[in-house]
Image: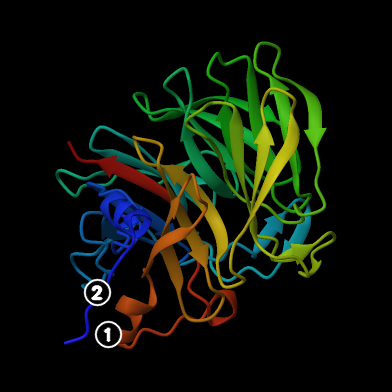
């Protein structure tokens, strides 16, 4: 038997764990994600197991008929209209109730405990994200008329609207509510808004923001993460840019970082775990699937990715006939466990 002798330095490295198998950096999460899609339903993913949804009854919530993001009117441009009803796109969770924004500008309240849903409430024209604001109201961003609609979840009614851009998709606030940020999808810009006066004080541009979606304030409250999927170049020309998370420093209101993603991860929404260590990303492959991915916030490494559409569609032989036959996911709401 051949003997191997190790020097003291090597033994010290072993003791320190340098040669031990490295565990995944991703934290263990406990909660449920509800992911909106153009098919008119929300896919359900248990974060503890990250099991792909496969049960058409248990792993989804049907809200409305299917509808495409790129149909109807967007930023004054007319696209083919597939259906009168719009698919789901973004939702906000308050307690056990989801407030789901639709692609036809309606809002549906869905009770997770009872499974009951309200009749669609007409609010705007074509919604993207739904975000709970500092005043407890829900802010719906409209891709058709560029308004941000303020919706009272208690009274189930619109209480205000703000004209901001052409086709707005997301909103986020600084910790002291001094400023808000709103993304404009086809223009690829982020507006900085003085929240006291509701006036736009700056427009942030970047060469790698050509077609953007939803935005999220990072846990440090100093950095805004922008979902720059870049499916199109300016003027809705064929996209030539990679997908990025573009990071904006909220102190200087300038771009401070670019996190490049694989080309089959055209991200739409980003949210953070309660600890701030993990970023949850919904992304479209533009093939036969959309995915939920977990990213280590510190290293920017994608640690886990799970199929959210094909896993169920393939089992039941479902064929997607909108959006160039690509199942497209959008925003997500998360109910965190204890």
| Residue 287 in sight from this viewpoint | yes
Mark-to-mark CA distance, 2 and 1: 7 Å
Q: Is residue 170 left or right of residue 77?
A: left
Percent across and percent down for residue 169 are 62, 45
Front in this rendered view, residue 169 or 190: 190
SS under mark 1: helix
Q: Position of residue 205 (x, y in %)?
A: 81, 42
**Quadrant of the rendered structure where residue 196 is?**
top right
Residue shown at 22% from the left, 79% from the top: 3
Q: Residues within 10 Å of mark 1 (few under 14, many from 20)?
A: few
Circles 2 and 1: CB distance less than 8 Å? yes
Q: Residue 187 in the image: x percent, y percent?
A: 79, 49
> What residue is at 58 percent from the left and 46 percent from the top?
214
Q: Which residue does the numbered mark 2 point to in the structure image?
A: 54
Residue 137 quadrant:
top left
Q: Is residue 119 visible?
A: no
């Amino acid at each position: 038997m051949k003997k191997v002798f190790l020097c003291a330095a090597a033994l010290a490295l072993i003791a320190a764990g340098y040669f031990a198998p490295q565990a995944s950096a991703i934290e263990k999460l406990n909660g449920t994600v509800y992911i909106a899609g153009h098919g008119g339903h929300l896919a359900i993913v248990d974060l503890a197991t990250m099991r792909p949804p496969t049960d058409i009854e248990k792993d989804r919530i049907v809200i409305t008929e299917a509808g495409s993001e790129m149909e109807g009117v967007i930023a004054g441009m007319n696209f083919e209209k597939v259906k009168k009803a719009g698919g789901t796109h973004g939702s906000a969770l308050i307690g056990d109730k989801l407030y789901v924004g639709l692609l036809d500008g309606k809002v549906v309240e869905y009770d997770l405990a009872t499974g009951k849903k309200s009749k669609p409430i007409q609010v705007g024209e074509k919604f993207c994200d739904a975000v709970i604001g500092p005043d407890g109201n829900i802010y719906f961003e409209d891709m058709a008329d560029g308004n941000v609609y303020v919706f009272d979840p208690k009274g189930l009614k619109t209480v205000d609207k703000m004209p901001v851009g052409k086709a707005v998709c997301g909103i986020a606030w600084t910790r002291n509510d001094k400023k808000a940020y709103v993304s404009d999808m086809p223009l690829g810009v982020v507006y900085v808004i003085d929240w006291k006066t509701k006036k736009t004080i700056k427009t942030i541009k970047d060469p790698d923001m050509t077609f953007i979606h939803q935005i999220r304030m990072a846990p440090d409250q100093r950095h805004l993460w922008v979902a720059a999927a870049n499916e199109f170049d300016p003027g809705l020309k064929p996209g030539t840019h990679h997908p990025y998370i573009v990071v904006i420093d909220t102190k200087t209101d300038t771009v401070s970082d670019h996190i490049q993603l694989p080309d089959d991860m055209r991200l739409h929404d980003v949210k953070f775990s309660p600890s701030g260590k993990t970023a949850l990303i919904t992304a479209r492959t533009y093939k036969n699937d959309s995915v939920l991915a977990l990213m280590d916030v510190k290293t920017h490494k994608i640690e886990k990715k799970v199929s959210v559409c094909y896993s169920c569609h393939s089992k039941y032989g479902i064929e997607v006939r909108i959006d160039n036959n690509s199942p497209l996911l959008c925003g997500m709401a998360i109910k965190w466990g204890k």
